[in-house]
Image (spheres, grey):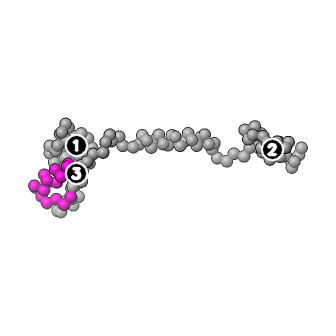
Amino acid sequence: MTAAETPPAGRRLGRAVPRSLCPVGEKYRYGPSRPFMYVVGIVVAVQLWHGLPKSAEPRDTAVLERTVYTELAAERPVAEVRCTRVGRELARCIATLPELGRTAVTARLDATSGEVRSVALDAP
């Protein structure tokens, strides 16, 4: 049999041959294998899962923001306060003050009750 008479991959002497049994020269492989792509997909999913924040539960910060707003408003005019808890005893806030614009504020919290112990403007 000459090269011109060689049947295409998957066909030998009139009967089907599984691709895995075809000689390497007749196998047309394009790109990585399917199992390799599954492994890559699983690895990427695990990396994304580990990259997610470790927050146990969502926290409502409305009470915290109201308390910080009330304490700041006693000293100066305040337009808005937004907070996020960064630990059991600490919250970081951004207060919008008319004379200073957006200003960083630190609120110290009681670890057991979650109540605000102190509020302080961060130094620029």
CA–CA distance between discs 2 and 1? Answer: 72 Å
Q: Residue furthest front?
A: 15
Q: Amino acid at mark 3?
A: Ala
Q: Position of residue 71 (x, y in %)?
A: 13, 52
**CA distance separating discs 2 and 3:** 71 Å
Q: Which residue occupies the extreme right position in the image?
A: 1
Q: Position of residue 78 (x, y in %)?
A: 16, 59
Q: Residue at x 42, y 40 (%)?
A: 50
- Residue at image position (52%, 40%) is 42
* 2 up-or-down from 100: above or below: above
Helix, strand or loop at label 1? It is: strand
Q: List x then y, in percent, for residue 60.
A: 25, 48
Residue 79 included in the magenta stretch of the image: yes
Q: According to the image, label 2 marks what residue?
A: 11
Within 10 Å of the Cα at label 1, are there few (<14), some (14-19), or many (20+) other Cα atoms? some
Q: Is residue 8 left or right of residue 70?
A: right
The span shown in magenta is 63-80
Disc number placed over residue 90 in the picture, else none:
1
Amino acid on which the number 2 mark rests in the picture? Arg
Residue type beneath disc 1: Leu
Corner quadrant of residue 113: top left
Give the labeled residue for mark 3. Answer: 62
- Pick the residue in front: 92 or 52: 52
Q: Where does residue 102 sit, x and y in percent of width and height?
A: 23, 58
Residue 43 seen by the camera: yes
Foreground: 124 or 18? 18
